[in-house]
């Protein structure tokens, strides 16, 4: 275990502003908390309460369909100071789709999350994670060229397994201790994640870790073009625009 740069028992750490995936560089003892697949009533709000208790911020990669169904909860996440990114619309394995179909699915998710946040004055950050962490070289390159920050995973808690909260927390901690830092994957749709999070964050505090708040360097999603999607109408808009850009 590398010597950690933080001796304090305060869990909330620095804010790291990034404009590209390569800029997500963590120091020993630093972690980024990420939650995929929400928002989900009864789960996401409980997780928000726990994060607030420990005074830490996380990144929520929301499904467009979930944000569309629960816009006020999506807004609450953003208004609480957490970073909101996207995770496609319907959690499709993009590697099984054709190129344009996959791009359409990503763009549909972006638009739905952005629309859910808009009434509260909040904007979608340009962070994205591939469902099932399944990607192709074409899709990853397309995302990066479109100024999207693709969030990879260093520590997969596997909270989608039907294990007890204690088992999931111990597994995540063991993997974190082996690495010393990293981006941690949870899902804010599981009750076991709600249950394990307080003890997990307490363990991070006791072991001297620091939770890094991840934010976009250049503002929200509207600091760049949305991913261009959807066939003829979108193509017509793209051709008339000088600057368009083409877990679980």
Image: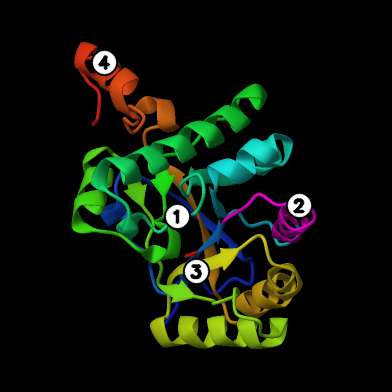
Sequence-first disc among 3 and 2: 2
Residue highlighted by disc 4: 236
Q: Is disc 2 placed on a helix, strand or loop?
A: helix
Q: Is disc 4 placed on a helix, strand or loop?
A: helix
For the record, the magenta segment spans: 37-52
Q: Nearer the viewer, mark 1 or mark 3?
A: 1
State how far apart marks 4 and 3 are (Cα): 40 Å
Residue highlighted by disc 2: 45
Residue highlighted by disc 3: 184
| Closest to the observer, 174 or 40 | 40
Q: Is residue 222 visible?
A: yes
Side (left or right) of 192 relative to 123? right
Residue 49 painted magenta: yes
Number of the label disc, if any, that sits on residue 92? 1
State how far apart marks 2 and 1 are (Cα): 25 Å
Residue 188 falls in image quadrant: bottom right
């Amino acid at each position: 275990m590398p010597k950690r740069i933080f001796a304090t028992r305060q869990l909330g750490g620095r804010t790291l502003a990034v404009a590209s995936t390569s800029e997500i560089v963590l120091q020993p003892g630093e972690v980024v908390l990420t939650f995929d697949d929400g928002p989900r009533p009864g789960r996401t709000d409980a997780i928000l309460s726990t994060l607030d208790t420990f005074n830490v911020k996380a990144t929520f990669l929301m499904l467009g369909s979930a944000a569309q169904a629960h816009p006020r909860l999506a807004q609450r996440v953003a208004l609480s100071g957490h970073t909101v990114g996207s995770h496609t619309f319907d959690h499709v394995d993009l590697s099984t789709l054709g190129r344009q179909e996959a791009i359409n699915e990503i763009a549909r998710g972006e638009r739905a999350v952005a629309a859910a946040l808009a009434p509260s004055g909040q904007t979608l950050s340009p962070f994205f994670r591939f469902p099932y962490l399944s990607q192709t070289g074409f899709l990853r390159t397309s995302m990066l060229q479109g100024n999207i920050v693709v969030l990879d995973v260093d520590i997969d808690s596997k909270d989608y397994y039907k294990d007890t909260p204690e088992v999931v927390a111990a597994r995540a901690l063991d993997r974190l201790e082996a690495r010393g830092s990293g981006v941690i994957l949870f899902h804010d749709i599981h009750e076991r994640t709600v249950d394990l999070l307080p003890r997990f964050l307490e363990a991070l505090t006791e072991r001297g870790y620091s939770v890094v708040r991840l934010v976009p360097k250049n503002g929200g999603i509207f600091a760049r073009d949305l991913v261009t999607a959807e066939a003829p109408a979108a193509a017509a808009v793209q051709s008339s625009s000088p600057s368009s850009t083409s877990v679980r």
